Amino acid sequence: MSRAEGSGATGVDPQQLWLRPARSGRGRKPAFSREAITAAAVALADAEGLEAVTIRRVAARVGAGAMSLYSYAPDKETLLELMVDHVSGELPVTEPLTGDWRADLKAIAHHQRALMLRHPWLPATLTTRRTPGPNTLAFLERALAALRPSGLDGAAKLEVYAQLTAFVAGHVGYEIAQAAVASSPERAAAETRYLAAVAADGHHPELAEALRAPGRSLAPEATFARFLGRLVDGLDAG
């Protein structure tokens, strides 16, 4: 395994990555750019999953040798950082805020969910610490501006944004898993029979009562909105 295919245990220097140019301006103009390399990696992850993203596969997509990509992305961890910030550029940062910080926070969460559904590999990359690049910082700035009317101090606003992002990432992972179950009627029926049997065994009265309650919409958008409402409406702005 080459150094470029590793898991990124060496870490990423954020100043080196984001505050210095991708390449020197001297010499012959390169045949490809960091932007093109990152876009190729994102397309590969969208099509085949994150496991398919290797320096060699990305190099093949842009028509380059793997060694020539090292100056742009010396390892997979760096490539993941670039990919996360690249897709974060799809998030809107110029729409006017309403001044209702809870409504604005919910809108931010819906944008995050839509982004993660377009790029199903994204939630898994957010389970480890990422260094915010320019696109990520632009959206963070918008979220902090949305939270200004809340009266929360700076540290609390950062915590709320982290909590919101973690919720969205976890929920999208749940949605993807549920969609896999729904695509298999046999599996869904088996799970329904199992829960019915457990509820009837007399040992789980609370679960039995919960399952007898009137059902609610299972549409993904409606489910997300309910869960998000419980989170955001319960935030303490004191």
Image (tube, rainbow, N blue to C red):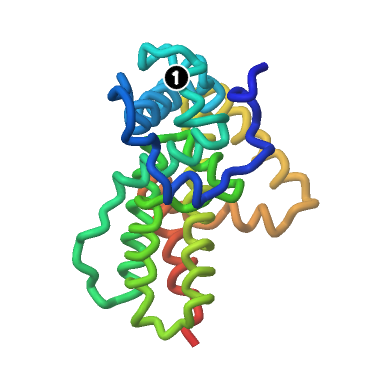
Residue at screen point 50% across, 16% down:
66
Q: Residue 122, relative to residue 92: is it above or below?
A: above
Instruction: Left or right? Give the position of 126 relative to 59.
Output: right
Residue at the right extreme of this rendering: 203
Q: Quadrant of residue 228?
A: bottom left
Residue 188 lies, in percent from the top left, at 55, 30
Nearer-the-camera pick, 110 or 150: 150
Residue 210 lies, in percent from the top left, at 60, 57
Dot 1 falls on a residue whose secondary structure is helix
Instruction: Left or right? Give the position of 154 relative to 206.
Output: left
Q: Quadrant of residue 83?
A: top left
Instruction: Left or right? Give the position of 42 relative to 238.
Output: left
Residue at screen point 67% across, 54% down:
207
Location of the N terminus (image quadrant): top right
Residue 198 lies, in percent from the top left, at 72, 43
The residue to which callout 1 is attached is 58
Dot 1 amino acid type: Val
